[in-house]
Image (cartoon, rainbow, N blue to C red):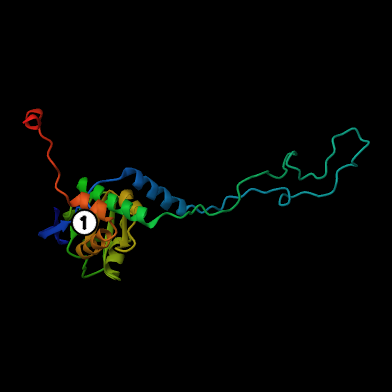
Amino acid sequence: MATIEVFNLSGEKTGKLELADEVFGAVNEDLLWEAVKHYRAGLRAGTHATKNRKLVSGSGKKLWRQKGTGRARVGSIRSPLWRHGGTVHGPQPRSYAYDFPRKKLLGALRSALAAKFADGKLVVVENFTLSEGKTKPFRQALDKLKVEGTALLVDGAAENRNLELSSRNLAGVELVRGNEVHPYHLLRHERAVFARPALEKLQESLKHTVSKRRATAATAPQRRRGTVKEVAQ
């Protein structure tokens, strides 16, 4: 079982946290791609629209009689065949959201956490208890934790007003609750900073969603492959 060091907001080590192999194990890149695609599809506004022949401006009067003129028959100036006429089969407002299996989403979340840990981009702090809601001291705390670039803050508390005030004006820093974290959030930001209670709770819930077969494979000791001589003996 792997472990990760826990820090306080002053950058000092306060202990270690054990990470479950069922959660911080293998990384399924295909599953991550599917989860990100599903999340971004739900973000699309889908407000695009084109005007068909009943919506474009123009008279609906028949331009000339049906027969006897030698010209092609035409019923309206709004015809799609005419310039400034309506659009045929153009895009209309719709939702791009679609259903995504919950098991696949939780599997993608496990893979995203495992990828962050494998890359050394996962930071765990004891808590996000702040004495005041000011940006500068919190930015200094992140610098002590060596959190540079974009960062995702995951807090387990139901409400932390000082943390919200301290982080909302920092460019590239996003705050989410422990029950709202998504694989897209973890992959979008360079570093993920978890409060220890939030990570423990998330890890425990993800452990219960792993199938028994995969849990056994994750916790089973890896069999060492012998050399040709060892196998022959």
Instruction: Quadrant for residue 206, please give it.
Output: bottom left
Residue at image location 37% in from the left, 45% down from the top: 33
Residue at image location 76% in from the left, 45% down from the top: 78
Closer to the camera in the image, 222 or 7: 222
Q: Residue furthest right?
A: 68
Q: Secondary structure at mark 1?
A: helix
Residue at image location 29% in from the left, 61% down from the top: 167
Instruction: Quadrant for residue 139, please give it.
Output: bottom left
Classify 10 Å Cα crowding around label 1: few (below 14), some (14-19), many (20 and above).
some
Can you give x and y, in whole percent of width and height, for residue 15 in the image?
10, 60
The reply to whether residue 20 is in sight is: yes
**Tally of numbered tags:** 1
**Drawn side of residue 35 relative to residue 115, left or right:** right
Instruction: Quadrant for residue 201, please give it.
Output: bottom left
Can you give x and y, in whole percent of width and height, for residue 61 in the image?
84, 49
Q: Up-down: is 73 above or below 193?
A: above
**Drawn side of residue 165 relative to residue 14, left or right:** right
Closer to the camera in the image, 98 or 132: 98
Q: Up-down: is 47 above or below 67?
A: below
**Drawn side of residue 216 relative to residue 89, left or right:** left
Q: Up-down: is 59 above or below 156?
A: above
Closer to the camera in the image, 129 or 134: 129
The reply to whether residue 171 is in sight is: no
**Drawn side of residue 133 relative to residue 96, left or right:** left
Dividing the image into 4 quarters, which one contains the C terminus?
A: top left
Q: Amino acid at mark 1?
A: Leu
Q: Up-down: is 4 above or below 228?
A: below
Can you give x and y, in whole percent of width and height, for residue 124 in the image?
19, 58
Q: Which residue is mark 1?
A: 142
